[in-house]
Amino acid sequence: DALHSQEAAFLAKDLNTVCDMADELLGKPITDDGELIGMLVRNLVLPFGKANQLAKYGQQYWQPAYYLCTRKDAPPEALDDWAVAGDWRWIKPIVENQNTKLETIEKLSRSQEPRIVSEAITCRRLPQETIDRFANREEPEIRHGVAIATQNPSILRALAKNADNQLSFFICLNPHTPTEVINEIGRIHLEAVHSIAYRVTDPEVIRSLCDRYGKKYEVYLTYKPMPADAELKKRWKLVVNGHCWGLNEPESLAAAAEVKDREQILRMADDLSSLRVDIDKYPTLGTQILEYLIGNEALPIEVARHILRLTADRECRDKLIERSDLTLELLDEFEPCLEQLVGLAYATNNFVILERLALEPEADVRLGVVLNPKTKMRTLENMAETDIDLYVAAMATKRLTSPEVLEKVANRKDFSDNEALVLAVKGNNCASEGVRGSAAMIHAANSKYY
């Protein structure tokens, strides 16, 4: 049943629709480990109070509470209540939510559950002296948290001594870890430095990376890291939010992640196309840089398609497909999977694509078209009159404004077979009194029958 589409629950934009979904879910047993409730709770169109009610209803599962605590409209008091509930599975979004009070995070850092303490540490909102006090704890989860969040090089050096592969990995991710510690870890746990290979300076470790992961890492044998200091930023050609594009991998990644200005992102794309910034010399973060730029809709989609030629990476291709400004030509060229088609149906601004997707055989795709606020009325009318999935037809009917079309929907041969369709006509104020009255009678008869 399309009613149980998680995409519909998460992406629906109409307040009445999401509230109706919530009321229906509150009246039914949970049969999917709370996944559908979780998706609806994530939808910010649903008022927080109703979302909180739903999350409590599904509290035996992790998803409803987890997604509730990610919401930007979650008040500090509600976040504190869920923190007190003490389930580590939803602590991460609590500590990361900017509405959470520092007192709540401090309370969590005193928990007896190491995983909860670790989450409180890694959110980096605790004072550094508080974080560093945990450095002598023996629990692996807490040591991992300190490795991620401390800014003290001495503590990082101490943690690196006799560190296993997992702890070494977290130490390497910390930007405050000294270079000599990175190199030492690479000699023992090569896989721990793979994701930050641009920080390695020991030629032997770099050669080991080449042997295990490919010759592309040879660039680091001649790579000289340059700090993006204030003086350099003053004379650098392109600086995005304080990040020097083309200086090195982390700086370029940060610039790609944060760029919003059309002129700047066009310059970045041109640098890549002309090889002034050679993505092949960024073997660690290059693909991620391309993903950010290709998925950024400040970059014209034809330019994004052009720089996609620089990589065969599927995730970069997916970023292009998921853009709301995808053209019909690109849709035909790339043939998205079902999940991508569903996402596109909800997000696209392209009327021609919406008309194409309205004919897709999968009901979840067509439901996305119905719930997309950009869908033209003629498309909705056609779907309300002819769609074989009666729930999709019902959702289209809710948006109709023509009394004549609403009467045609009420005259469908299968009209009385679906309660949602009957209720959609009955509740649409644009329908004539006679049509609404007839729908009300059918609903009453069906309710009495069942």
Image (cartoon, grey):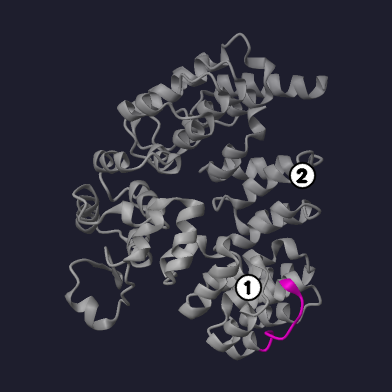
Magenta span: 133-140
Is residue 176 among the parts visible in the rendering? no
| 115 left or right of 407 in image | right
| Quarter of the image that includes the C terminus | top right
| Quarter of the image that includes the N terminus | top right
Q: CA distance from mark 2 to mark 1?
A: 27 Å
How crowded is the residue under tag 1: few (<14 C-alpha within 10 Å), some, or many (20+)?
A: some
Amino acid found under the numbered disc labelled 2: Asp
Query: Taking 342 as reference, is 151 above or below it?
Result: below
Amino acid found under the numbered disc labelled 1: Pro
Q: Give the percent coordinates (x, y) of residue 252.
A: 32, 63
Q: Residue at x 49, y 52 (%)?
A: 213
Frontmost residue, 95 versus 450: 95
Frontmost residue, 296 versus 377: 296
Q: Give the percent coordinates (x, y) of residue 343.
A: 49, 37
- Judging by the rendered image, the residue that carries numbered circle 2 is 33
Q: Give the percent coordinates (x, y) of residue 145.
A: 64, 74
Q: Is residue 135 found inside the magenta-colored segment of the image?
A: yes
For marks 2 and 1 on the same chain, the one whose residue lies earlier in the sequence: 2
Q: Residue at x 22, y 83 (%)?
A: 231
Query: Taking 43 as reference, is 169 above or below it?
Result: below
| 30 left or right of 442 in image | right
- Judging by the rendered image, the residue that carries numbered circle 1 is 76
Query: Quadrant of residue 324 in the image?
Result: top left
